[in-house]
Amino acid sequence: DTGVSQDPRHKITKRGQNVTFRCDPISEHNRLYWYRQTLGQGPEFLTYFQNEAQLEKSRLLSDRFSAERPKGSFSTLEIQRTEQGDSAMYLCASSVDSKSYNEQFFGPGTRLTVL
Amino acid sequence: KNQVEQSPQSLIILEGKNCTLQCNYTVSPFSNLRWYKQDTGRGPVSLTIMTFSENTKSNGRYTATLDADTKQSSLHITASQLSDSASYICVVSSTGGSYIPTFGRGTSLIVHP
């Protein structure tokens, strides 16, 4: 257990529905990242926050994807009008701003299945 | 373009044997390189992290090496165990102001009894 938690762990939804995932980072970590991972691939960067500011969102896969971190603590990732191609593992990671390695600690992921 | 290439894509070995996984990168300017282990259906867990000045780092039966000149890294697993069956992902970060690391696709390792 890295200290990063994600909820839910699994989500099955029908095409066209909206889904929202939550990530709770390690408490003192000010950076939070979202990734998507499909089978046999490495994690694909989506977006990241420093405190409550979303510093990079150009790699969100489409305008159906959005993320928030309103108080600089937990974050949510929402996918609107889900498509079957959205089926994947969604990973959250957190890190602390330092002059060191900016090592990211990953949560267990949310497995999304779109029927 | 920053890239991380890993080989082999998959590997099957017998329990107790050693193996070596490779990682080549083109990330520049280089900050650090990490190896993660990812069990099926779980998030990645860090094994080792190395900066430019480090050329080897060990974590139990895992030993990572880094050649910053050739931009290559390897992860050596000694006396493999069934629990080593997982995907091993190489991740390289840049000092170029972006906190977005570059991930390899991973090597899938299966250890058979």
Image (spheres, coloured by chain):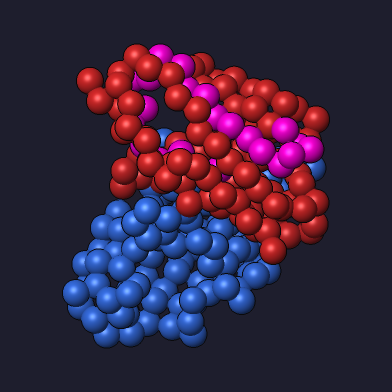
Chain colours: A blue, B red
Residue B70 magenta-highlighted: yes
Q: Front-most of B4 and B57?
A: B4
> Which segment is the magenta one?
B67-90
Q: Front-most of A88 and B56?
A: B56
Q: How many marks?
A: 0
What residue sits 54% from the left and 62% below the top? A45
- Quadrant containing the N terminus of chain A is top left
- Quadrant containing the C terminus of chain A is bottom left
Q: Front-most of B9 and A30?
A: B9
| Observer able to see residue A61 | yes
How far across and how far down the image is residue A22, in percent? Answer: 41, 61
Q: Front-most of B76 and B52?
A: B76
Q: Is residue A45 left or right of residue A109?
A: right
| Observer able to see residue A28 | no
What residue sits 70% from the left and 52% below the top? B26
Q: Is residue B76 left or right of residue B94?
A: left
What residue sits 71% from the left and 52% below the top? B27
Q: Is residue A96 left or right of residue B89?
A: right
Residue B80 magenta-highlighted: yes
- On screen, B87 above or below B104? above
What residue sits 63% from the left and 35% below the top? B73
- On screen, B46 above or below A47? above
How far across and how far down the image is residue B51, in percent? Answer: 74, 35
How far across and how far down the image is residue B76, in percent? Answer: 52, 24
- On screen, B74 above or below A82? above
How far across and how far down the image is residue B59, in percent? Answer: 55, 21
